[in-house]
Amino acid sequence: MDKLGSQKPIAESAEAYIGRGAIPTAPLPDPIAKNIDTIVALHTRAERDVPRHQRLVETITAFCGRPAFLYSLILVISLWMLLNTLLLPRLGVATVDPPPFEWLEWLIDFGSLLITTGVLIRQTRQDQLAEQRAQLMLQLNLLSEQKIAKLIALVEELRNDLPIVENRRDPEAEVMQQAADPHLVLDVLQENLSRELSEFQRSTSVPHAVDVPESSKDTRLG
């Protein structure tokens, strides 16, 4: 009875906690927490190195990619056309940009050029960050492959030294003890891709001979 009574408040408190929109989670293990901190530190350092003027350009570019900017642009263009076609002529004021709205077209072209340049600036920095991540992943993968090869070599050495374990030759383990040469792997991969591509192009470019029945040949000869 006491156990049930003690579990009921806990369940009610958990339901109330979830009802507020928060989900209780267990604390993360230390290795995962350290990895998260490392990733956050890398992103923080990358953002800290961005100049202030480039950060301003990227902020404006990010705003131009939101729906609010599209709605604002449509509203401004609509007001501009309405002002120069209906409101100003009715008030007896000379229109600033009569149809076909050459000034509006120039402003749109100029704004498109600025937005495109801002997008290219932001995309260039994102490409640089992606290249750095790719280089980091390549270095870590090569290091992991070397560590795995070393572990296999140590396990094989331990297996040969233990008297209780049967000493037998394992060709696969002997091959896996040696770390792969990335230059050799890349050369083989490029060679295989080139060969496959050339065979595919040859098979698609050379037309197959069409078999003509003998009866049709005789008919055409006759």
Image (tube, grey):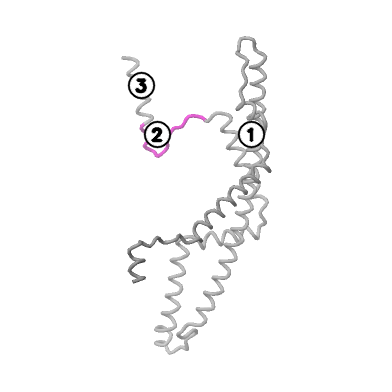
**Identity of the residue drawn at 58% across and 51% down:** 195
Using the numbered discs, state the Cα–Cα distance from disc 1 to disc 3 in whole angstroms: 50 Å
Considering the numbered disc 1 on the image, is that residue within a helix, a strand or a loop?
helix
Q: The disc labelled 1 sits on which kind of residue? A: Glu
Q: Which residue is mark 1?
A: 145
Residue type, numbered disc 3: Gln
Q: Residue furthest top?
A: 164
Tell me the element at label 2.
helix
Q: Is residue 64 above or below residue 4?
A: below
Q: Are marks 3 and 2 in contact (CB under 8 Å)?
A: no
What residue range appears in magenta?
A: 15-27
Numbered circle sitting on residue 17? 2
Earlier residue among tags 3 and 2: 3
Image quadrant in which you'd find residue 90: bottom left
* Main secondary structure type of the part rendered in magenta: loop
Residue 129 in the image, given as x and y percentages of width and height:
62, 50
Q: Who's the residue at 35% across and 28% down the image?
A: 12
Which is nearer the eye, 77 or 43?
A: 43
Choose the circle earlier in sequence order: 1 or 3: 3
Residue 15 image-quadrant placement = top left
